[in-house]
Image (cartoon, helix red, strand yellow):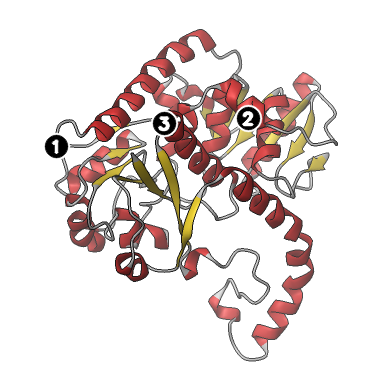
Amino acid sequence: MKICTITCHDVYNVGASLQAYALQTYLKSLGHDVWIIDYKPDYLSQHYRLDVVGNPKYDKPIIRQAYLLAKLPGRVRMLPRKKTFDNFNAKYLDLTRRYASNDELKADPPEADVYFAGSDQIWNPLFKNGKDPAFYLDFVQQGIRASYAASFAVDEFPQELRDVTAKYLAKIDYIAVREKSGLAVLDSMGIHNAETVLDPVFLLDSAHWRSIAKSPAQIDKPYLLVYDFDNSYAVKAIAEKVASEHGLKIYSVFDLPYAEHCFTLCGPEEFLGLIQGASYVLSNSFHATAFSVIFEKEFAVVERTEKINTRMRDFTAMLGLSDHMINNEKDIPYNADWNEVERLLSDEIMHSKAYIDKVLNGGGR
């Protein structure tokens, strides 16, 4: 059977890359011919471009040139990180030809028996991809349409987008979202036949992830790993307390002044190696949380300043780890019951794989 998936696979984010890899790899393990649609509209093609002005208020004559010159050194410094991701894509992802718009997909869609939309935040209405009909499989002309672990990442879907989004969703044969909160969002749009499944990274076991993990050469154990998108004061306070109490160095994926070493150029494989080797993981990231669970690492997750916390909240609650989602250094969690986590997780993995089987076998249509 030929299968095509569509997701935000090439946005230089480790979670996006690893979830795309995981879904393709699991489907291929079932014996299918699987391709990721290389969908790169303009709004997903600006990463690491030297001529992009990120803030519209600076996109004016003279100011634009000054802005680009000021940003140039930092952008050039980060180009090796881009190369790391590009190498990962070339090594691990099987891609179709590139498409730049939903209209281009409609004009000449890649042929497949089954199309999966997902996973990750492809339906997040705060981002442009959440409003893009391509991520709702609008371009598909023949074949089964399904979503797998698509995430809205918000509790409330904007009222002005509901009608048009509901029309796209109504054409999908099977809908599975990643969070229980996503079911409520679907209900608000009149979609009641959906279910929840795990993020694709859980379709592969920890041994598989260890087999592709790479430990950066600069690692000196033991250490606490920080993965903080917000440069959060709360994350800093928690990190410093955990490190002090347990004699840990502080390492970071992003450039943080209080970290002893920052792995700003790391790609997906190095990210896995950093989590695998950590004594504690502190983040405001869904996928850092997910891989902490996969590798059974003590962890805490702090809410993002953006209102996209349903992912971490629902996931930790599902595994009986709600106490691992914190906002200050007063109640830092330790000693997770990994036997109980494994029991709950294995049930969810079985359900997620059964959903895929149902889609591929055409059951319940």
* Secondary element type, mark 2: loop
Q: Give above or below for 206 relative to 236.
A: above
Label 3, label 2: how far apart the Cα atoms are: 48 Å
Front tag of 3 and 1? 3
Residue visible at 38% across and 52% down in the picture = 124
Residue visible at 85% across and 36% down in the picture = 218
Front tag of 3 and 2? 3
Q: Which amino acid does the dot numbered 3 rest on?
A: Gly
Q: Is residue 56 left or right of residue 316?
A: right
Check the picture and name the quadrant holding the N terminus. top left
Taking the image as drawn, is residue 337 in sight? no
| Marked residue nearer the N-terminal end (3 or 1) | 3
Q: Residues within 10 Å of mark 2 (few under 14, many from 20)?
A: some
Label 3, label 1: how far apart the Cα atoms are: 23 Å
x then y, percent, for residue 83: 71, 55
x then y, percent, for residue 169: 22, 51
Q: Residues within 10 Å of mark 3 (few under 14, many from 20)?
A: few
* Numbered circle sitting on residue 329: 2
Front tag of 2 and 1? 1
Instruction: Answer with the quarter of the image where residue 215 lies.
Output: top right
Residue visible at 84% across and 35% down in the picture = 217
Nearer to us in this view, 174 or 321? 174
Residue visible at 49% across and 23% down in the picture = 323
| Marked residue nearer the N-terminal end (3 or 2) | 3
Q: Are marks 2 and 1 in contact (CB under 8 Å)?
A: no
Q: Give above or below for 111 relative to 191.
A: below
* Numbered circle sitting on residue 365: 1
* Secondary element type, mark 1: loop
Quickly name the residue at label 3. Answer: 31
Q: Which amino acid does the dot numbered 2 rest on?
A: Glu
